[in-house]
Image: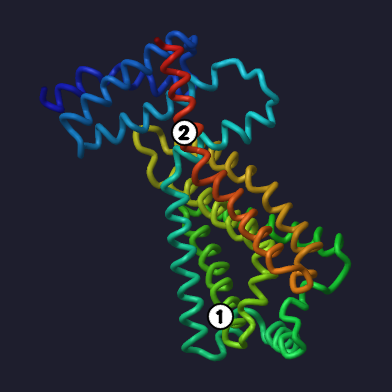
Amino acid sequence: MREVYFIKQNKEKWLGIEQVIQGKIKKNPDDLSSLYINLINDLSFAQSYYPKSNTTVYLNHLSSQIFQKIYKTKRIEENRLLYFFKTEVPMIVFEYRRYLLYSFIFFFSFMLIGVLSAIYDKDFANLILSEGYVNMTIENIKNGNPVGVYQEGSTWGSTIGITFNNIIVGAKLYLYGIFLGVGTFFVLMQNSIMVGTFQYFFYEHGALADSARGIWLHGAFEIFSMIVEGMCGLILGASILFPRTLSRFNSFKNGFKNSFKIFLSTIPFTICAGIIEGNVTRHALKMPLALNLIIIFGCLGIISFYYFFYPAIVNKKIKKQIKNAII
């Protein structure tokens, strides 16, 4: 069948599905299941005969949207908050997973720029980290206490200040995505270059290992959350730039709704990072190295699993449930 005829034959049905997704037409779960089966059949046909066509891309996106719609119409018997973190956010992360990859690529690229800039420009650390901070930290390193800056102030006073600051940075990474993603790109660039410069600064002064024992106690949650927040900003920007078959406004509404849910999921990790930085990091060099590594890799393992691996597990589980329900 020629692609033009295939589109003409099914166009009205697909437009109807778009209206269901947007909430303009109400359907019961059984009707939604029938729509989903029909759409999957169309997608399979398109993948077989028009694998590189925009039609296939469009149908894949549409099937993902109706898939979420089906699952959300099911009765949620568990706690709403538990459902949000256990099911809803992982589903959305899985749908937008490529933006998480983009954010990671940007982060590591800019971090490398920070490292290289610090290597070839000896004043770069003063420019990025401030001369006062650099001088203070050099003095701490000479005194055998590279993480001395984390020992200033009260524990809970530091925790509140640090957490509030990290939430502000995360909000900027996300909300600046409204400027077509450019704002998010710029804020992510600033912070990533700072991380690279910061790490090379300690390396240059022979204190990388000791600094890492402290910095990455809270950094595992803090930096990973920052990358996920960058992902949210990129989703927001892409929803405006690439509306596909939706109106630009409806595309933005969908992008904002989904990205905001992902952003909210980072808040607990940001709070945990602030608690660790305010209460634990100051004791980093006094605790056994094994305990440092357990906390660092434990935190990294938890947040990596939640955003990288768990969404695929949830997606597979829900697809199986829907398939069984349809059958």
Numbered disc 1: secondary structure: helix
Residue 16: give its label.
none
| Above-or-below relation of 126 to 326 | below
Real-space Cα distance between discs 1 and 2?
A: 45 Å
Crowd around label 1: few <14 · some 14–19 · many ≥20 (10 Å) = many
The location of residue 103, given as percent across then percent down, is 47, 56
What residue do we see at 62% from left, 19% from top? 76
Q: Is residue 121 above or below residue 269?
A: below
Looking at the image, residue 58 sits to the left or right of residue 318; the answer is left
Quarter holding the N terminus is: top left
**Which amino acid, mark 2?**
Asn
Task: Check the image and tell me how it is coloured.
Answer: rainbow
Q: Is residue 29 above or below residue 249?
A: above
The residue nearer to you, when weighing 4 against 103, is 103
- Which amino acid type is marked by label 1? Tyr
First reached walking from the N terminus: tag 1 or tag 2: 1
Residue 132 horizontal side relative to residue 21, left or right:
right
Q: What is the quadrant of the C terminus in the image?
A: top left
274 or 246: which is nearer to us? 274
Q: How many marks?
A: 2
Residue 175 appears in the picture as rendered: no
Q: Which residue is mark 2?
A: 250
Q: Which residue is mark 1?
A: 200
Quadrant assignment, res 164: bottom right
Query: Residue 190's x, y, as percent?
Result: 55, 69
Secondary structure category for the residue under label 2: helix
Q: Is residue 168 left or right of residue 19?
A: right
The residue carrying pointer 2 sits among few (fewer than 14), some (14 to 19) or many (20 or more) residues within 10 Å by Cα, namely some
Q: Nearer the viewer, mark 1 or mark 2?
A: 1
* x then y, percent, for residue 32: 43, 14
| Residue at x-position 27% and y-position 19% | 41
